[in-house]
Image (tube, helix red, strand yellow):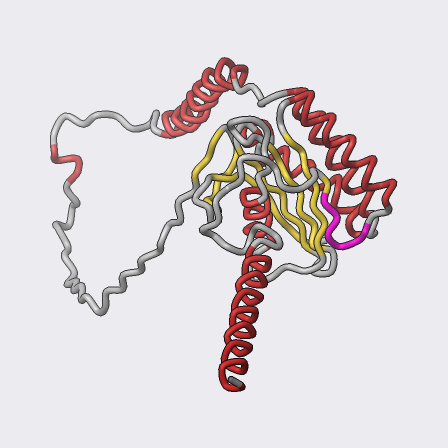
Amino acid sequence: MKRKVISLLSAVLLSCLCFGTAVSAEAESQSDGVRQTNTMIPDERQKPLVADEAGLLTEDELERLNAKAESISEEYQCEAAVVYIDYLDDRSVQAYADDYYDYNGYGYGEGDDGILLLVAARDREYAMTTYGSAIDVFTDSRLENIETVIVEELGDNDWADAGNAFLEECEGYLHDGPPSYTWIMILGIPLCLLAGLLLSFIPMQLLKSQLRSVAKKGSAAHYIRKHGVEIWESNDRLVNVTRTRTKIEEEHHSGGSSLHTSSSGRSHGGRSGKF
């Protein structure tokens, strides 16, 4: 009887340990929504638009930034999000931002349109990632402009001001919409053709002016040297041949935005750096 009780208790204890391990592993895999590359992308956003996982903001600052981000999202139907973390892991800051966006369900509507700024406070790095229609709005040059605005604030540890500046820049560009390149097509092509004609015409005229003293000769006698033809011995010897191959990385562009592929297989735009 005693052995049966001990066996029963051992079985119960073993079951509890297995269940606890499974729950712990499940919680760990879903703790940030970005560690597992095979995780399904949620249909709905799992976190607020402004997420402070590093404890850098006051409650009032966090509330105000979230209200601003939600207002922008609803008005322009494109999410603008800010995420603060302490440290990066083994991924680059750009990959971390892409994964955070994808696996936490960020993005407005069926196209998951949006832009997200991720700040790694202690690593002193940041990254912006864009997806959907936001790729066309936030071109490389516009992301660079946003970068110049927020880097100074981040460098001074003004976390809330940096987030607010980012959201204001996003609101301005979303209001303007994707940049138009029509005027470049209308004026740029004729100007390029005109510039090409001028650049070729001027050197040709200079060369022509130097050849005015040259006239056509009637016979070949004018081209024969008086003292005959002199030939010197000349030898060419091939010593070595060196071939160099350079791999050219392909970049994909969409309306002025450089694209890259995240771990989920989706195409993102973006920009990253240090502060």
Specify the farthest residue to the top. 186
Segment colored magenta: 51-56
Q: Position of residue 260 (x, y in %)?
A: 47, 43
Horizontal side, residue 232 vs residue 5: left or right: left
Q: Quadrant of residue 167?
A: top right
Q: Which residue is nearer to you in this view: 134 or 58?
A: 58
Q: Quadrant of residue 238?
A: bottom left
Q: Which residue is nearer to you in this view: 163 or 2?
A: 2
In this rendering, the count of numbered labels is 0
Q: Position of residue 254 (x, y in %)?
A: 47, 31
Horizontal side, residue 196 vs residue 218: left or right: right
Q: Residue drawn 74% across and 56% down? A: 121
Image: 92 above or below 208: below
Q: Residue drawn 57% across and 53% down? A: 30
Specify the farthest residue to the bottom. 2
Q: Which residue is nearer to you in this view: 14 or 212?
A: 14
Horizontal side, residue 243 vs residue 134: left or right: left
Image: 119 above or below 16: above
